[in-house]
Image (cartoon, rainbow, N blue to C red):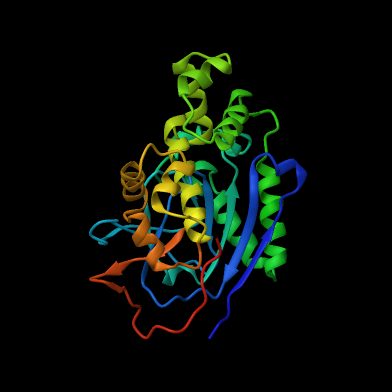
Amino acid sequence: MRTMNYQTLTPAPALSAAVESIWIYSGYRPPHLLERVLPSGTVEMIVQLEGSPFRCYDPVSFALKQVMHGPLIVGARTEVQVIDTEQQLDVMGVHFKPGGIRSLFAMPANEFSGMDVPVDAVWNGFGEEIAVRLSQAPSPVRKLKEMERMLLSRLDAARQPHPAVPAALHRIEQAEVPISVGALAEDLGLSFRRFIEVFTSHVGLTPKSYSRIRRFQRALRIIHNRRQRSWADLAFDCGWCDQAHMIRDFKTFSGLTPREYESLNVEFMLHVPVEERGQICPIPHAQSMVGLPR
């Protein structure tokens, strides 16, 4: 049995406005075949270090929907993504900050939204280069540093985010109740339409959708850490108008009610085993394994 190995790298200062962290893990073989990845509102890069395909499934029927190869850009999304776990034995990734990909990609972030896009479709030939250079790095630490060097080589300091975007992100994160998009646009000196256009092109989601995802994330964190006093209190504390509204959003973003999410008692907040007829979908000859990083 392989044990879980998870390491992260805080990027160099030149990348810090774009990248939250670079991570690598190996040895992931949980006792379930499929799992939901709950939406975070952020953009990721995923690299299968063993060259395995990336397989996605319909979130309702669980039928195989897509098979992709090579490093991928995983766009910001508002819906749950269902993936298999056999593909995740050796994986590496880049967690971009909201709005941070502007200095790395010429394409607007909303062109990735809800999609898994091969890196080669964005940076011609660079996906293959990533795979080759990572395969030649002899250790997890060296792979992390190699990924950092490759991202630095693609950094374009001239492509700075619109100043309204970091200001808006900060206001959304700090708001205890849903913030008015119109009022936010006015405060930032932009028309309503222009603000939505600028924000969406940088973040990949509209301000309203991003705010809803962040509220959902706050609720997930409270449930995951077992801090809620009651469901009504949770709805109020996270800015929903009532408990029913919270439940509707939970179902929209995860396919689960808050109570169902809580009952699964997941180890890692955004990764939820798929249940089939009340049972966790098994992997044939499943082994006892540890979980996935947050």
- Please state which of residues 212 and 196 is positioned toward the viewer in this rendering: 212
- Residue 115 position (above or below residue 175): below
Quarter holding residue 136 = bottom right
129 w.r.t. 178: above or below: below
Examine the rendering and report whether any part of residue 267 can be seen. yes
* Direction right: furthest residue: 13
Q: Nearer the viewer, residue 226 or 208?
A: 226
The answer to whether residue 116 shows anywhere in this view is: no
Query: Looking at the image, is 255 positioned above or below residue 190?
Result: below
The residue located at (39%, 67%) in the rendering is 264
Residue at figure coordinates x 64%, y 60% from the top left: 133
Is 31 or 127 nearer to us in this picture?
A: 31
Residue under the image location 70 percent in, 32 percent down: 157
Where is residue 86? Give x, y as percent: 42, 72
Answer with left or right where residue 278 lies relative to residue 170: left
Q: Quadrant of residue 188?
A: top right
Residue 129 position in % (x across, y down): 60, 55
* Residue occupying the point 70% across, 43% down: 15
Number of numbered discs overlaid on the protein picture? 0
Residue 253: image x %, image y %? Answer: 36, 48
Residue 245 at x, y percent in the picture: 33, 41
Viewport quadrant of the C terminus: bottom right
Location of residue 187 with respect to 86 vertically, above or below: above
